[in-house]
Each structure stands twice: as C-alpha cells, then as structure tokens.
Image (spheres, rainbow, N blue to C red):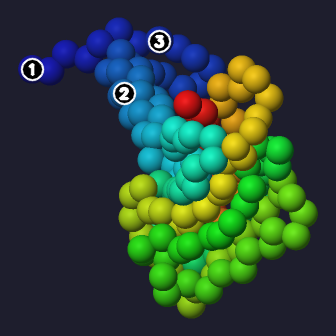
Amino acid sequence: MVKAGPVERTGTTRRTGSDKAVLRIFGLVLLGLMLAGDLLAVEVFIPQISARPGEMVQVPVVVDQAEGLAGVKLVLTYEPDVLQFKEAAKGPKAQAMMHIVNDRKPGHLILVMAGARGIDGKNLVLFHLGFQVQKSMKNGRESTRVQIVETQLLSEQLREIKATVKTGVIRLE
C-alpha cells in the first residue's frame, strides 16, 4: 500500500508533498540549465600579453564557443601614443573568410569578416593584430589596452549571435 504525503489546499488545486518535490527539482534543473548556458556563451576576447618598448607585438583577437560563425564586425580602440597599428592577419581557422580592416583613424580599428560557411570551435583566433610599441613613452607607464568597444557576430543563417567581451592588458616591460 502506497501512502501519499499530506495534502495542502491552494485555491482549487491540491498539491501533495511529492508534487512540491517535483516542482522544486524542475526549478533546480531549469536554474542549472540557465547557468550552464551562461558558461557556454560565446565570448570575444583579447588575452593578456607582454611587450617591450620598440618591439613589434602580435595581439590575438579570439572568439570562444563559436558555432556557425559566418560574420564578424569588431570596433577596437587603442592608444596611438603607445601603439602603432601595422597589420591584421587572419587566424588559422578563419582563412576561408574574407576580411576588411579600416585603420584610417589612429587609435581606432574596424575589422569586418564574412564567409559563406560558418566556423566552429573553442578559442578560435580570428585575427592577429600587429602593433609597434612606441620606443619613448611617458615615464612609469606599465600597461595599455586594445579594447573591443563594439561587437557584432552573425551565424550562417544571418542571425545575431550574442557574445560577451573581455579585454586583456598589454603589460609593458
């Protein structure tokens, strides 16, 4: 013989103790899925690197957790009194995509990339940005940044892909 738990009356619906347990478990599973979705979200970032005055430095622009990434528009800023932009090269998995770099305004870069087929993967390098670190800088300068100030990612179906953005520091040694 199976015994049911105590019955509570809420309006016209009766819920047993086991019904409440199922609802709690469902809520916890839903919360877990939402948190896991945040952990697996697409992220565009520039990792932390080091450079010396007068040195040419390669700054990678990376996308993590990409699936079907077919279009990219990034707007970046940097300090032109510390860094001088020289070149942009596509990363290994982005070779099939076309790209355009607008570097007309010192301190401001617009990078656009598109392909007929999307790319997938974790920690994909989209670009290696080449900068010359100025030889003479203000005394005591310890770091600078190449900041991602605008991001637009598109899927193969031309749907926007939401992404978080993180900018790393370039430590000056």
- Say if residue 156 shows up in the picture: no
Circle nearer the N terminus (1, 3): 1
Looking at the image, the residue that sits furthest to the left is 1
Q: What element carries label 3?
A: strand
Identify residue type, mark 1: Met
C-alpha gap between disc 3 and disc 2: 19 Å
The numbered disc on residue 1 is 1
Q: Is residue 87 above or below residue 26?
A: below
C-alpha gap between disc 1 and disc 2: 25 Å
Circle nearer the N terminus (1, 2): 1
Identify residue type, mark 2: Ile
At which x and y percent is residue 33?
Answer: 43, 40
Q: Mark 2 points at which residue?
A: 25
From the image, state whether disc 1 or disc 3 is nearer to you: 3
- Which residue is found at the position 55% from the left and 31% from the top? 173
- Say if residue 99 shows up in the picture: yes
Identify residue type, mark 3: Glu
Q: Is residue 92 left or right of residue 128?
A: left
Q: What element carries label 1?
A: loop
Q: Name the residue nearer the viewer: 67 or 60.
A: 60
Q: Name the residue under label 3.
A: 8
Assign the N terminus to one quadrant of the image: top left
- Which residue is found at the position 65% from the left and 26% from the top? 142
Q: In which quarter of the image is residue 58?
A: bottom right
C-alpha gap between disc 1 and disc 3: 21 Å
- Which residue is found at the position 41% from the left and 27% from the top? 28
